[in-house]
Image (cartoon, rainbow, N blue to C red):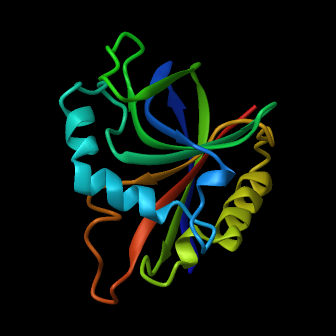
Amino acid sequence: MEIVKVYKESMPSVKLIGKRYTNEDRNENGTFADYWQQWFREGWFDILNQCGNIPGVSDDYLGAMRMTDSGFEYWIGAFLAPDTKVPSGFDEVEIPAGDVGVCWIYGNDQSGELYSMEASDMSMAAFSEKGWNFSENGWFFERYNCPRFTEPDENGNVILDICAYLI
């Protein structure tokens, strides 16, 4: 696993539409993998894809997380325009415009290494090395970009975007 690119992008105000999970929803391995499988099985991303997208903003699937006064939240969903009507059965949260640090992590998605604390810590260290600050209670997200994440290279590896809203 290695970092192949680190950069900053500006995000407009977005509405994160998806489903919210907490630590109590983790599986026996401590992950939310069962819910990702359910999302694909139930066609929930297809429903969100019909809502349209924001020009200039990725329409990739997201695993977004933050700490709140109520505890840890993990969202599976997508960023959509703030005026998007939320489909029945989905939750929403508004995220204000801001700069986002993006770290491309290259590795094997089957081994679990891309979803590890090590991958997250590497990304946060790369942001810090650039002099960028992020809030421990701010939004962090994994962005599953097509084709970087969906089409493995000749070594069977992909790139996962690990992102953090900067302060």
Residue 128 at x, y = what percent?
79, 53
Left or right for 165, reference 167: left
Q: Is residue 40 above or below residue 94?
A: below
Left or right for 102, reference 53: right
Left or right for 83, reference 53: right
How many marks overall? 0
* Residue sitting at x 22%, y 35%: 47
Residue 119 at x, y = what percent?
64, 69
Between 103 and 85, the one lying in front of the other is: 85
Between 95 and 161, the one lying in front of the other is: 95
* Residue sitting at x 79%, y 41%: 133
Residue 25 at x, y = what percent?
59, 53
* Residue sitting at x 37%, y 47%: 61
Q: Quadrant of the C terminus?
A: top right
Left or right for 50, reference 68: left
Which residue is most to the bottom? 155
Which residue is most to the top? 83
Between 157 and 94, the one lying in front of the other is: 94
Between 87 and 6, the one lying in front of the other is: 87
* Residue sitting at x 33%, y 63%: 148
Q: Quadrant of the N terminus?
A: bottom right
Q: Is residue 151 above or below residue 66?
A: below
Residue 113 at x, y = what percent?
56, 78
Q: Is residue 148 above or below residue 52?
A: below
